[in-house]
Image: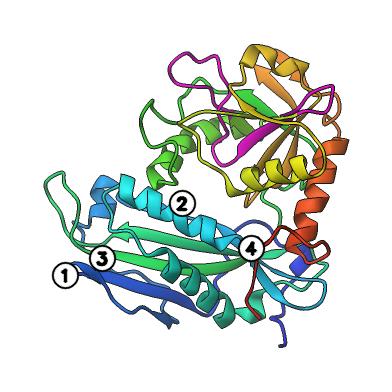
Amino acid sequence: MEKKNIDWENLGFGYYKTDKRYVSNYKDGKWDNGCITEDSMVAISECAGVIHYCQTCFEGMKAYTTQDGHVVVFRPDMNAQRMYDSAVRLEIPPFPVERFVDAVEQTVKANLEYVPPFGTGAALYIRPVLFATGPVMGVKPAQEYQFRVFASPVGPYFKKGSASSLVLKVSDYDRSAPNGTGHIKAGLNYAMSLYPIVTAHNEGFNENMYLDPQTRTKVEETGGANFFFVTADNKVVTPKSSSILPSITRHSLMTLAQNLGYEVEEREVYLSEIGDFVECGLCGTAAVISPVGKVNDHGREIIFKNSQNGMGPISKQLYETLTGIQFGKIAGPDGWVRKIV
């Protein structure tokens, strides 16, 4: 299939409207059959639950053109389950897992011309979103909802890409509350991070490092990615907390690290100890792996010596293994890659 005339290698991470999207509506206690449509606009009541009470959640994944010319999606079943869990927490009727995966497949097939060619480093970002469309005045769940899947070709999330290191600041703001919604992909979590991230950018930082809201002593995540660290003796460590998002990329990287022979540990990580780590990385669908060179803790600089000038050796090995699986260069664990065409 002939691709669209796009400068694939210079794509940023932004919205590039594609031709088709999948839409299904919930009304009278059930989801309709859903369909592919060209209509990219959403018309809702001024009193819609999504506007007033933030009843919305979303997901993110990517489709890739593999080395042998196939188009694949990475672990969509895990995104489907995570959205299901998010919906339950927000009192939204969950969209069935099997139908979610099918909707993703339909959306990718309908936009194959927008899947970047192999070797460009770009991918087709897929955004499923679930939100309340029905009018609701009192504080309660709406009665009508929409599930929508659209796609956009994208390049690196951070403009510097994976070769240059990021500089973070320890934020004075909390990303989520104890026993709140930090563990689900709710839109309101990201709204709360907008002011701190704009502030960080204005101060010259790439992102924030959020601490646990109860004690403000433990590392949680950034506004849009999970952390992992590497010790001097090559142990891969990731923060454990009930209020951070269970990243599919992070879960995959920990599995790959273990398969590569590294010791892996998920535990509470204290701010006071992060200077002992030699590598630090952000991980997520958008970020993939982005190396962190240093963290500024209110003027005190914490430097990760092996990742201050780009990826450290273990981060690089994990990155090459993960992207190798996604782009079909390496055979991954069973079920990780779903072939679309």
Q: Residue at x 58, y 23 (%)?
A: 219
- Tell which tag, 3 or 4, sits nearer the viewer: 4
Q: Kindly give the residue lying farthest to the bottom in the view shown.
A: 1
Marks 3 and 4 sit apart, C-alpha to C-alpha, by: 38 Å
What secondary structure predominates along the stretch shown in magenta? loop
Q: Is residue 298 visible?
A: no
> Between disc 3 and disc 4, whose residue precedes?
3
Q: Secondary structure at mark 2?
A: helix
Q: Provide the secondary structure element on which disc 1 rests.
A: loop
Report the mark closest to the observer, 3 or 2. Answer: 2
Return the residue nearer the eye: 58 or 236: 236
The residue to which callout 4 is attached is 335
Q: Position of residue 179 (x, y in %)?
A: 36, 29
Image vertical order of residue 66 relative to residue 163, above or below:
below
- Mark 3 or mark 2, earlier in chain: 3
* Disc 1: CA contacts within 10 A as few (<14), some (14-19) or many (>=20): few
Q: Give residue 71's quadrant in the image.
A: bottom right
Part of the protein shown in magenta: 209-235
* Side of 255 relative to 102 (left or right): right
Mark on residue 44?
Answer: 3
Badge nearest the viewer, 1 or 3: 1
The amino acid marked with disc number 3 is Ile
Is residue 121 or residue 69 the one in the foreground?
A: 69
